[in-house]
Image (cartoon, rainbow, N blue to C red):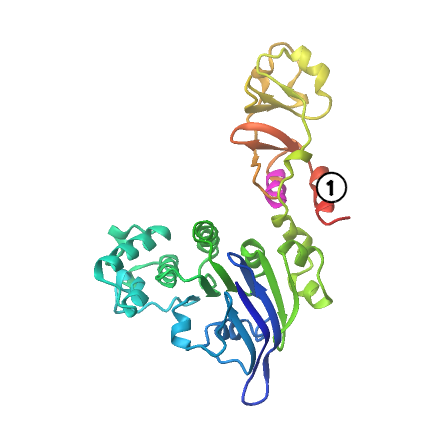
Amino acid sequence: MIRLESLTKRWDNGQVAVESLDLEVGAGEITVLVGPSGCGKTTTLKMLNRLIEPTSGRIFLGGDDVTGADPVELRRRIGYVIQQVGLFPHLNVADNVATVPRLLKWDKERIRKRVDELLELVGLDPAQYRRRYPHQLSGGQRQRVGVARALGVDPPVLLMDEPFGAIDPITRHRLQGEFLRLQEEVGKTVVFVTHDVDEAVRLGDRIAVLRQGGVLEQYASPADVLGRPASPFVADFVGADRGLKRLSVIPVDVDALEKPVTFTADTPLSEARVALGTSSAAVVDVDGRLVGELRPADAAGEGTVGDRSRPVMATVDRTATLKDVSSALLLSDSGWVPVVDGDRLLGVLTPESVHAAARRAAGT
């Protein structure tokens, strides 16, 4: 847990970087700081590990007041990852990851095991990467090594300052997913700085929106920041498309799925036409697994449903969000998207039901 009490930073010229910031980050949570350039995001992060000394206020790490603690000892309890990674170019990957364990005088075998464990954790094969140098790595690989180094001595707190900001969009999205997977395993208390609202929404358990002068405008879940902005500033910052962004944090409600008309492949077309109506039907096997769809235009004539069924253009998993569903709807011309558990059909969502689910989530 991290708690900030009235944390303030004024520069020597009198300019206020952060103004009386009160913030609490729960253990194992990811809090993302967002806001315009110059709003104090990075300054706040650097005050947490005392790279910048606050003018006033207090910092608690766990139950300890670390405002006046030894900064060097404090930083050994906190992992720190920055945008440009900051790997030592003259050291190979293994030696970079081992930086803090060596400072703490761990023995060689313990260091070797920890380095290999961390490289595997971030998805880099130790046998392949431990002897490489930073210039031999891609940007995404360097960033993974930076995360591994920050986790060197298993710190309870991880500070991340736009760690994926200098990486191409495809790699960035992949690393965000890897980071969420990693967080599931290690459960660190994370403070993450970004200027990208979409990244904040995807990664954060809670989002802190700061305005110029380091004033906290709103601190809430991504759904609340997008659905209930606390001020015109927050509404403007998260964007006019915040309703669309909010779809990415609303999960599919399995209990509210529509139940489509279903047939098996051996159902006679004559029987299917009676029940079909104007919408497509799902074709399932005897175990409820989705195997295709039957459209009204394809149901004429003799034969069975299996003779005329088509492959389903798009499905979503039960763990999907309404954003995933909306994307799938755009790929489908059936008017609905099946929601599956593995390959078993649970139900379908239509544009109307997506809209209703979004309104329910917004409490309207």
Q: Is residue 29 visible?
A: yes
Q: Position of residue 288 (x, y in %)?
A: 57, 22
In the foreground, 333 or 345: 345
Q: From this view, report whether residue 1 is shown above or below residue 19.
A: above
Residue found 30% across the figure and 65% down from its top: 101
Q: Position of residue 270 (x, y in %)?
A: 68, 11
Q: Quadrant of residue 308?
A: top right
Q: Residue furthest left?
A: 108
Residue drawn at x 57%, y 24% as measured from the top left: 292
Q: Is residue 123 left or right of residue 172?
A: left
| 325 within the magenta span | yes
Q: Nearer the viewer, residue 21 or 1?
A: 1
**Magenta span of residues:** 322-329
| Residue 15 spot, x, y in % from top left | 59, 85
Q: Residues within 10 Å of mark 1 (few under 14, many from 20)?
A: few
Label 1: which residue? 356
Name the outermost residue toward the front.
63
Q: Is residue 172 above or below residue 357?
A: below
Q: Residue at x 29, y 50 (%)?
A: 125
Q: Nearer the viewer, residue 352 or 39?
A: 39
When asked about the image quadrant of residue 236, the answer is bottom right
- Residue 100: percent from left, percent from top: 32, 67
Q: Seen from this angle, which residue lies furthest bottom?
A: 13
Give the dominant element type of the magenta stretch: helix, strand or loop.
helix
Q: Of helix, strand and loop, which one carries label 1?
A: helix
In the figure, 321 relative to 255: above or below? below
Report the amino acid beneath label 1.
Ala
